[in-house]
Image: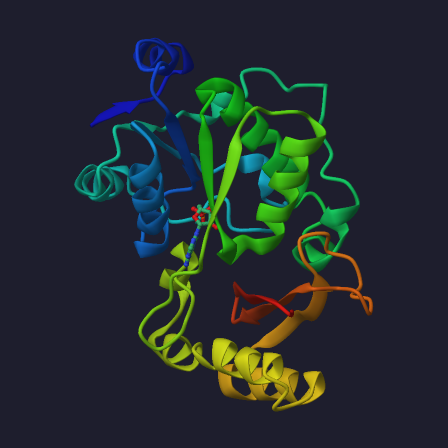
């Protein structure tokens, strides 16, 4: 496995591999088994796997955790190599944003819901960096986790609207044994918060199964975690619109502040 930090170097390294298929797995690093599930899916379907590791400043708001976001490239390199990644692309912020660009992509109406309501510029930053990574790597397929269901829906829309010749592949949420969705941000949790956090998925599941109301679910999550619900919302998926009588596919999504840590989770399901 090679770790590459420059765009020109990566392009050069990939140029002789383009007869085969190339997978891109975009991440912000501090890898866990969720990321490695994306790699496993990518490896199963492609000849070459590129993982990007870039904590993208443009998707963080001014009072968010860009500075403190966990970073450990040495640890990530070891895990990625073991998982069979061929190239890590780990650019600096200057390499990705040498000039303050003036042509912008906007994530549009889908970005105003769910996480976008409390993180108003987040998805503009996401589509900016993902569009750049798509153009830099020019992958055959790109892999995204359903953990970030809204991100996945917006990326699928961007690919459709801007004609990126890339297949978007969705990978189910990987959870800890007690149900907590794996996340790089779980390291922020104190032992006590970590022990209580599985209540999020447990109560979300009860709501999805019709065993309790939305209000009761909010209260149960806040009581169990000592946290504060940011949103608990059911929408049609992937359009992220209000469900109607003809809606067949749903997302039930939650964001909770547990202390200063914002945890997200969701369940996507279909009715026949
Ligand atoms: P991140 O490094 O948190 O930006 O995540 C990079 C990619 O990994 C995104 O496509 C995420 O949706 C995906 N991902 C993160 N956590 C999980 C998880 N627990 N299960 C599945 N995919 C995940």
Q: Is residue 72 visible?
A: yes
In the image, what residue occupies the spot 62% across and 30% down? 128
Residue 27 position within the rendered picture, expressed as x and y whole percent measured from the top left = 42, 41
**Residue 52 or 268: which is nearer the viewer?**
268
Residue 142 lies left or right of residue 19; in this view the side is right
Q: Residue at x 58, y 27 (%)?
A: 131
Quadrant in which the C terminus appears: bottom right
Given residues 25 and 121, the one toward you in this image is 25
Residue 169 left/right relative to 232 = left
91 is higher (above) or lower (below) than 112? above
Q: Position of residue 202 (x, y in %)?
A: 48, 82
How many badges with numbers are in the image?
Answer: 0
Q: Is residue 95 visible?
A: no
> Which residue is at the front of the view, 58 or 168?
168
Query: Residue at (70%, 69%) from the top-left corner?
Result: 234
Task: Pinpoint residue 110: horizontal percent, then vertical percent.
Answer: 74, 48
Q: Position of residue 135 (x, y in %)?
A: 53, 19
As drawn, which residue projects farthest toward the front? 272
Image quadrant holding the N terminus, namely: top left
165, above or below 35, in the image: above
Residue 54: quarter of image: top left
**Left or right position of 200 against 39:** right
């Amino acid at each position: 496995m090679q770790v590459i930090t420059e765009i020109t170097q990566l392009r050069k390294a990939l140029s002789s591999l383009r007869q085969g298929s190339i997978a891109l797995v975009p991440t912000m690093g501090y890898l866990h088994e969720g990321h490695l599930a994306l790699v496993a899916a990518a490896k199963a379907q492609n000849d070459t796997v590129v993982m990007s590791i870039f904590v993208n400043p443009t998707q963080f708001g001014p009072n968010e955790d860009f500075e403190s976001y966990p970073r450990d490239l040495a640890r990530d390199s070891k895990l990625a190599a073991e998982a069979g990644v061929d190239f890590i692309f780990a650019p600096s912020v200057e390499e990705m944003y040498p000039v303050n660009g003036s042509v912008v992509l906007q994530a549009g109406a889908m970005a105003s819901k769910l996480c976008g309501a409390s993180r108003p510029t987040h998805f503009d930053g996401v589509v900016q960096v993902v569009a750049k990574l798509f153009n830099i790597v020019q992958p055959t397929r790109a892999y995204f986790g359903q953990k970030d269901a809204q991100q996945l829906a917006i990326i699928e829309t961007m690919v459709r609207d801007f004609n990126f010749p890339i297949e978007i592949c969705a990978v189910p949420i990987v959870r800890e044994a007690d149900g907590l969705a794996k996340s790089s941000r779980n390291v922020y949790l104190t032992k006590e918060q970590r022990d209580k956090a599985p209540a999020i998925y447990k109560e979300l599941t009860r709501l999805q199964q019709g065993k309790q109301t939305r209000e009761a679910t909010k209260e149960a999550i806040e009581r169990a975690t000592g946290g504060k619900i940011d949103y608990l919302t059911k929408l049609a998926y992937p359009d992220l619109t209000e469900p109607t009588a003809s809606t067949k596919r749903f997302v039930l999504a939650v964001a909770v502040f547990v202390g200063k840590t914002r945890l997200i989770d969701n369940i996507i399901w279909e009715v026949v």
